[in-house]
Amino acid sequence: MTNDNSGDSTDTGKPNPHAQQVLRLADAMLRTALWPAVAAVVLGMIVATLLVGLPGLFGAAVGGAVAFASSLVTLWLMRKTSNLDPMAVMALALGGYILKLLVLLGVMTLLKGIDALHPYAVAFTFLAVVLVWAAAEAVAFRRTKIPTIIPDSGE
């Protein structure tokens, strides 16, 4: 296998078992989380529209979009770092998580002052989508049967 930047092989051309498992898990997480998260956004938009009108609709749509983007960034980071040493992946995951939280804090702070967006609709839809996505990722992790320890090929 050649290194095609997808993280499925090492620089020596040998398959990287860690990268293969991380990519498999990222794919499973996306497949499992996508439709439940879409349903959470739609439900949030419906409820917010019924409760507070158009600002609720717009707020829920924005909150859902921000949550979706946040969740997709996590999967993107998994895919981009999959070929690295597992300890480096963990360090980058922690750094990416902290950076993502800071960006989300900034985005949500900027959205606070926009009158066309109902703040509770933004917040509750964002929270619902993140929780649904995280639960779906946990389900995908359990179903994927990823080995906790991937033995070295030992050559």
Image (cartoon, helix red, strand yellow):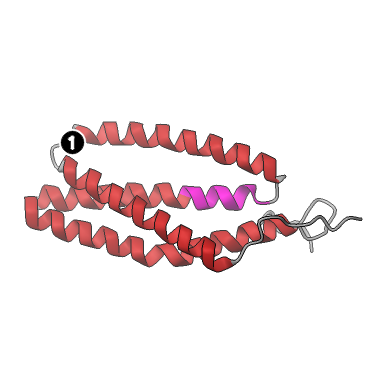
At 13% from the left edge and 37% from the top edge, which residue is drawn? 115
Above or below, 120 against 25 in this view is above
Q: What are the residue bounds of the magenta stretch?
A: 73-82
| Res 4 seen here | no
At 29% from the left edge and 64% from the top edge, which residue is drawn? 39
- The reply, left or right, for residue 50 in relation to residue 113 is left
Residue 66 appears at what percent x and percent y? 34, 46
- The reply, left or right, for residue 57 in relation to residue 35 is left
77 part of magenta stretch: yes
Tag 1 residue:
114
8 part of magenta stretch: no
Locate the N terminus and report the quarter of the image it occupies.
bottom right
- The reply, left or right, for residue 153 in relation to residue 126 is right
At 16% from the left edge and 61% from the top edge, which residue is drawn? 46
Most extreme residue toward the right is 155
Label 1 element class: loop
